[in-house]
Amino acid sequence: MKHGLCLCRSLCFYIKHNVRTSISLLDERTVCSASIKELTLAVKSTDKSQTVKIGGHRLDPQGNYNAPKTIPLSQSEIYLSELIDSICNKMEDYARGIWKSNGTLTILKMVVDGKMNPHMDDIDFVQDEDLNKSLKYYCESVMEEYEEDIIKHYQNGENLDEKYCTENSNICLPHKPDILKNEL
């Protein structure tokens, strides 16, 4: 009986440790994709009629006057930087979970289009000590490391998608959980 109890405790510790390790790996992969999708939604929802002037009233070395240039607000470096700084707060709307159908780890946006996510019944939610604050931490890490590159993409009029995480930053593996494709 003692051996069975020790084996059971060891097995429980092993499973708990491996689930946490897998969740950590998952977070790095999926938070990047979710963050980029949230950021793209925020940029797309920017009023297209709003513009800002960039540059100053300066003379170039040849003495020519360079008037300020007008650009869409959604391409302003300051505006994009502020969006990037605030986008990680949206990670508080996500929770970790495991798909009941295949046991795959994922993150789930709790509210979609003002309604509870219809996939909530398909997920076994994973409780953790930090109440999902690490999702925000992973987001902040990604955004901080790649902020300049992300801003350049938007300034060039490009919309980023989950491919950014695999092709540009190499954070994510090409395989993404289905929820990120369907729900964001």
Image (cartoon, rainbow, N blue to C red):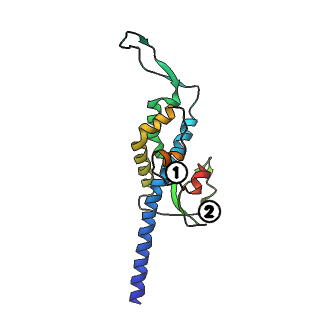
**Amino acid type for the residue under numbered disc 1:** Asp
Quadrant the N terminus occupies = bottom left
- Check contact, mark 2 vs mark 1: CB within 8 A: no
State the residue at coordinates (55%, 25%).
50
Task: Report the side of 97 relative to 118 (left or right).
Answer: left
Q: Calculate the distance from the C-alpha at mark 2 to the C-alpha at mark 1.
A: 17 Å
Percent of width and height locating residue 79: 47, 32
Q: What x and y, as percent, mark residue 24?
A: 43, 59
Q: Which residue is mark 2?
A: 121
Give the residue type that dot 2 points to: Asp
Q: Residue at x 42, y 86 (%)?
A: 4
Q: Is disc 1 surrounded by few (<14), some (14 to 19) or many (20+) residues within 10 Å?
A: some
Disc 1, SS: helix
Residue matched to label 1: 93
Point out residue 32 in the picture as x, y percentages from the top left corner: 48, 49
Residue 33, horizontal then vertical, whole percent: 51, 49
Which label number is shown at residue 169?
none
**Residue at (54, 32) in percent of width and height:** 157
Name the foreground residue: 145 vs 62. 62
